[in-house]
Amino acid sequence: MSYIFRGGLLATSLLAGAAQATTLEITVTNEQAVGGLYFTPVLSIFHDGTFDTFDSGANASAGLEALAEEGDVSGVQADVAAASSDFQTAVFANGAGFPGAPVIDPGESATLQIDVDTATQRFFSFLSMVIPSNDTFIGNDNPTAYELFDSAGDFVFANAIQVFTTDAWDGGTELDDGNGAAFAPPTGTPATDTNEVVSALANLDFLIGRPQAPGGTVQTASGLLASISINEVAPIPLPAGLPLMLAGLGAFGLLRRRSVGG
């Protein structure tokens, strides 16, 4: 009897496992007007709710420091990979960004379709450097802030994420004076390193008047900075013939049970 029971469980578990994959279409948009702020390619992280990108009031990790100062996502990506092989990352970049970098300009968007696992990648996190700052960034410090799927695997994300300039963070790793800032015209003075903690910023008015690498200066640094829309395209279909095989396994188990039971 135990053998027959395991056969029935096998069919059920295969079906459940096959139904865990789905495709999401995600669009990141810079909502600033011309003369507003830019931001670097957005790192998105799909995880089970346990990967914490940063904590307010604590020092930035080496990976976050590289992202907040240089827009370099590789350190955080390595942290994600080290945390679990079940997690994944994706980078939203704008190929039409200003010369030398695929940053996302005011009014521009980047869209990707991504296959995710609804069991191990239920939650969404993001990070991006604000330009032309020294170490200002956007992201969510609560790893469960954005739930994509419930525990049953159903897509539950309802509203686009809106990131305002008042939602930005100070990385606490460089003095925010514009000197040595990445993606900004050189000032001839290197950046000043600091050893402060990550903290919320009340506003980004300190960036107004700073020169932008494409030319001109920042004219506005308020209002809606970014939006992130997430939609389920369609569950990934089962491999051809798999439903029939699973049905056959279930029928086989039933027949075996009847045979053994007499």
Image: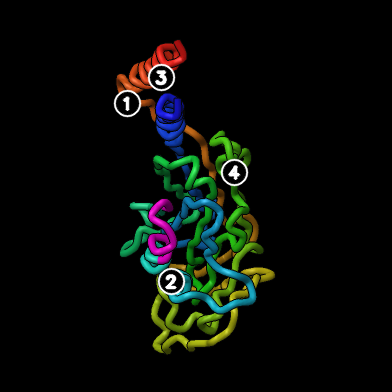
Of circles 1 and 3, the one toward us is 3
Q: Is residue 214 visible?
A: no
The image position of residue 204, as x and y in percent, is: 62, 69
* First-in-chain label (1 vs 3): 1
* First-in-chain label (3 vs 2): 2
Q: Disc 3 designates what residue? A: 253
Task: State the residue in front, 179 or 73.
Answer: 73
SS class of the residue under badge 1? Answer: loop
Mark 1 neighbour class, 10 Å CA radius: few under 14, some 14 to 19, many 20 or more: few
Tell me if residue 15 is in the magenta stretch.
no
The image position of residue 252, as x and y in percent, is: 37, 16
* First-in-chain label (2 vs 1): 2
The residues colored magenta run 79-87
Task: State the residue in front, 261 or 206.
Answer: 261
Cα distance between the residues tagged 1 and 3: 22 Å
Task: State the residue in front, 125 or 108.
Answer: 125
Q: Is residue 235 above or below residue 106?
A: above
Instruction: Locate the N terminus by quadrant.
Output: top left
Residue in the image at 38% along x and 26% along y: 237
Quick check: marks 2 and 4 in contact, CB under 8 Å? no
Cα distance between the residues tagged 1 and 4: 32 Å
